[in-house]
């Protein structure tokens, strides 16, 4: 492949993966935008702590439901059509939240958005992992996490802007509720714009070539693989796929066979631990945590924007190193750093050292460690470790584990902050985060540079070696 063709192929690869990564952007935007609306919705609807937790976590319940059916649908009908469904759900949710007439309608709209997030959170990284060549797979899947972090920080910026510019001047335009007295409506409704872009863009991208191969559509798969990485690489990928044979049942039961037991444990534990480490407690309840540290509301929102920016910047560390250094080194460094940062944050609260910048500094240290390890590497690993024939269903199971952890954190964090205080809340997160180090050491193989078929063969060889 000459330089010009290679450049065109890389451009095509990046564009397609960026479109799929928009699912991550909407995931990040929708989960983070809630942080700026909690106090406003709580005041408007006089919410109790339990209702406040339900407002935050109802979307996470929708995520769990969305994930539960997305794997089967994506295996049966294709990755692309399921992504289109997620975009429609995002769009409907944003419009529903903006114009909701009651708290129950708001909750229903949030649940619909949660369905969209759940579907996109599974299918977007799955699509990218199957679409990208092995030499660039880590980087391409990390683009999903980058888009997610950009979605988070833009949600913070839009919240801060809308809160700062809420004005009764819009009353004459009939938009008083949305842009003035109930500005949370504008915050939640803004997601309709990227959702519409995502929906239209999906009609321009092809289906996953590996899904096409599973359906026996070799010619179509070959055309896409050739455009991505040239004829020689495409032929090599197809040969490797065929060499796997068709000895699987295409059922999730395949994953419970002894040969894939380690992959199952990784798929269940790594995503769950990535959530119970407390990352989304900081994203959802950041302003409240910073207020407890002595920040004013405006400063707390500013601190939240800083958190979002650090999350974006340090995700680039993973993008440029995950295919060079590997998955395991990033996990060891990032998870270890996150545990230390969480312990120190808890100690600062316990000792009453809440004035000055120290709380924010170590929250930023925690975020940076998460951003180059747990955040992107979790999606890379769970997109790689499962067999071809059941990757959609298996990844749905792994993503379901992630959302269960996310749901628990979203529901329990306000209760922990109120009942246990900030110090014990962060110490509990440190305790929940630390088992990921043992998981990485004992179970997770290094997968950089390996084709998906090579990784599938690894489990078979590993099982035979321990027989």
Image (spheres, rainbow, N blue to C red):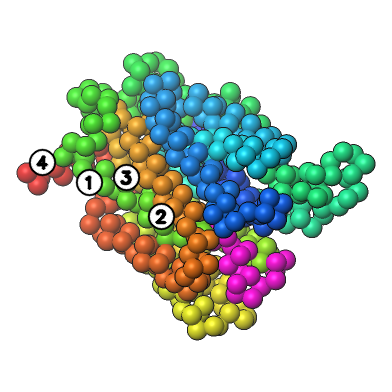
Q: Taking the image as drawn, is residue 193 in sight?
A: no
Q: Which residue is mark 2?
A: 274
Pointer 4 or 3: first along the chain: 3
Estimate the spatial distance between the alpha carbons at disc 1 and disc 2, rounded to whole Å. 18 Å
| Nearer to us in this view, 205 or 392 | 392
Q: Quadrant of the C terminus?
A: top left
Magenta-drawn stretch, dominant element (helix, strand or loop): helix
Q: In what element is the residue under mark 4?
A: helix
Whether label 1 touches label 2, CB < 8 Å: no
Which numbered disc, 1 or 2, marks the residue that appears first in the sequence? Answer: 1
Mark 1 lies on residue = 262
The residue carrying mark 4 is 464
Q: Which is more foreground, mark 4 or mark 1? A: 1
Q: Residue at x 21, y 40 (%)?
A: 260
Disc nearer the start of the sequence (2/3) = 3
Does the residue at mark 1 contact the one at mark 3 (Cβ under 8 Å)? Answer: no
Q: Is residue 327 left or right of residue 179?
A: left
Task: Give the labeled residue for mark 3.
Answer: 267
Q: CA distance from mark 4 to mark 1?
A: 13 Å
Circles 4 and 1 in contact, beta carbons < 8 Å: no
């Amino acid at each position: 492949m000459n330089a010009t063709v290679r450049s065109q192929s890389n451009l095509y690869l990046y564009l397609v993966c960026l479109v799929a990564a928009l699912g991550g952007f909407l995931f990040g935007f929708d989960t983070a935008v809630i942080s700026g609306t909690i106090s406003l919705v709580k005041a408007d609807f006089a919410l109790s702590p339990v209702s406040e937790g339900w407002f935050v976590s109802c979307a996470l319940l929708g995520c769990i439901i969305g994930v539960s059916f997305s794997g089967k649908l994506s295996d049966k009908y294709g990755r692309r059509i399921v992504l289109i469904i997620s975009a429609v759900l995002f769009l409907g949710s944003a419009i529903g939240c903006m114009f909701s007439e009651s708290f129950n309608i708001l909750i229903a709209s949030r649940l619909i958005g949660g369905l969209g997030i759940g579907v996109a959170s599974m299918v977007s990284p799955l699509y990218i992992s199957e679409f990208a060549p092995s030499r660039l797979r880590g980087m391409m899947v990390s683009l999903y996490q980058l888009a997610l972090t950009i979605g988070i920080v833009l949600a913070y910026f839009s919240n801060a802007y809308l809160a700062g510019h809420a004005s009764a001047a819009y009353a004459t335009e009939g938009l008083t509720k949305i842009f003035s007295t109930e500005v949370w409506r504008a915050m939640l409704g803004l997601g309709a714009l990227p959702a519409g872009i995502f929906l239209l863009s999906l009609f321009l991208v092809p289906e996953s070539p590996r899904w096409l191969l599973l359906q026996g559509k070799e010619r179509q798969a070959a055309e896409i693989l050739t455009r991505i990485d040239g004829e020689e690489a495409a032929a090599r990928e197809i040969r490797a796929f065929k060499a796997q044979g068709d000895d699987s049942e295409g059922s999730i039961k395949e994953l419970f066979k002894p040969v894939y037991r380690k992959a199952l444990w990784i798929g269940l534990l790594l995503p769950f631990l990535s959530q119970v480490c407390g990352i989304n407690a900081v994203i959802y309840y950041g302003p409240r945590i910073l207020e407890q540290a002595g920040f004013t509301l405006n400063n707390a929102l500013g601190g939240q924007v800083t958190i979002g920016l650090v999350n974006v910047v340090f995700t680039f560390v993973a993008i440029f190193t995950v295919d060079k250094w590997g998955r395991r080194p990033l996990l060891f460094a990032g998870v270890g750093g996150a545990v230390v940062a969480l312990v120190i944050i808890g100690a600062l609260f316990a000792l009453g050292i809440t004035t000055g910048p120290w709380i924010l500094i170590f929250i930023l240290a925690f975020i940076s460690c998460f951003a180059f390890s747990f955040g992107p590497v979790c999606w890379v690993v769970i997109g790689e470790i499962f067999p071809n024939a059941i990757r959609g269903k298996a990844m749905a199971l792994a993503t379901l584990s992630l959302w269960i952890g996310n749901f628990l954190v979203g529901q329990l964090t306000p209760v922990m902050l109120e009942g246990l205080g900030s110090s014990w809340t962060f110490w509990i997160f440190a305790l929940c985060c630390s088992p990921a180090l043992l998981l990485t050491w004992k179970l997770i193989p290094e997968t950089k540079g390996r084709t998906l078929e090579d990784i599938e063969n690894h489990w078979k060889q590993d099982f035979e070696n321990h027989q």
